[in-house]
Amino acid sequence: MKRHNLISPLVLLSGLFFVMFMVSCGKEGATGPAGPEGPAGPKGDTGSGSVIYSAWMDVPFKADTIHLAGGGIDTVGFYATIDVPKLTLALLSNADVKVYINSSDASDPEIYPLPYSAPSGLYIQVMAYTQKIQLYSNADVGTVSANGKKYQQYRYMIVPGNVLGRSAAQVNWSDYAAVKVYLGLED
């Protein structure tokens, strides 16, 4: 004897009515009036609109030499100094000082952040002082001109800090429980 399942047709029929009801509901009519404006929110943190940056500039490198005991001179590296009048002692204490090199020309830039280290062994280091940025490299990576285009131009950006972060110096980063408490994490 074959058993008939009466629940399936009822489920299908009620599903069909539900779909038809949902399809028949539409968004008709005009949009209602705008509600009242809410209260103003709290003043946000000051942004970084005070970023100091330079235009792309030509930077010549000079040979860093030593005098040998036999009277010869040996080149041990190359250096360049960029004058940065707005780089104060206060900014050195709380700002992020960045330097970039465009290894290509302005029409087809290839920009790298410094310090730079290549698999070939080439490196360019950056040191910032009051009103100066010094670059040091194991190759002459100064600005060059070829076919009317300039290559290896440099620019700096100084991003002043405006909010003191919390100190992580006293957190044991190997202790999960201490890190969890410090970062306010929940299980």
Image (cartoon, rainbow, N blue to C red):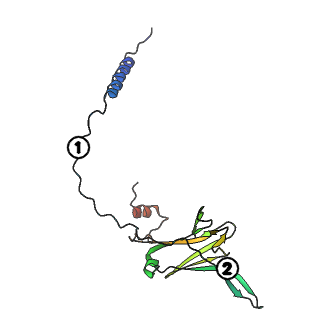
Q: Residues within 10 Å of mark 1 (few under 14, many from 20)?
A: few
Q: Residue furthest front?
A: 148
Q: Residues within 10 Å of mark 2 (few under 14, many from 20)?
A: some
Determine contact: label 1, label 2, CB under 8 Å.
no
Q: Residue furthest top?
A: 1
Where in the figure is residue 65, as x and y percent of width and height?
A: 69, 85
Determine which residue is flagged by label 1.
33
Q: Quick one: 84 or 185, which is closer to the camera?
A: 84
Q: Amino acid at mark 2?
A: Gly
Is there any visible trace of residue 8 in the rendered image? yes
Position of 160 relative to 132 (above/below):
above
Where in the figure is residue 3, as x and y percent of width and height?
A: 42, 12
Q: Quick one: 46 or 69, which is closer to the camera?
A: 46
Position of 72 relative to 54 (above/below):
below
Q: Quick one: 71 or 18, which is closer to the camera?
A: 71
Secondary element under disc 1, as helix, strand or loop, is loop
Q: Residue at x 62, y 80 (%)?
A: 79
Is there any visible trace of residue 98 in the rendered image? no
Q: Residue at x 36, y 26 (%)?
A: 19
Quadrant of res 75: bottom right
Q: Quick one: 49 or 97, which is closer to the camera?
A: 49
What's the CA distance linking mark 1 and mark 2? 72 Å
Disc number at residue 77? 2
Where in the figure is residue 178, as x and y percent of width and height?
A: 43, 64
Q: Nearer the viewer, mark 1 or mark 2?
A: 1
Quarter of the image for the C terminus: give it: bottom left
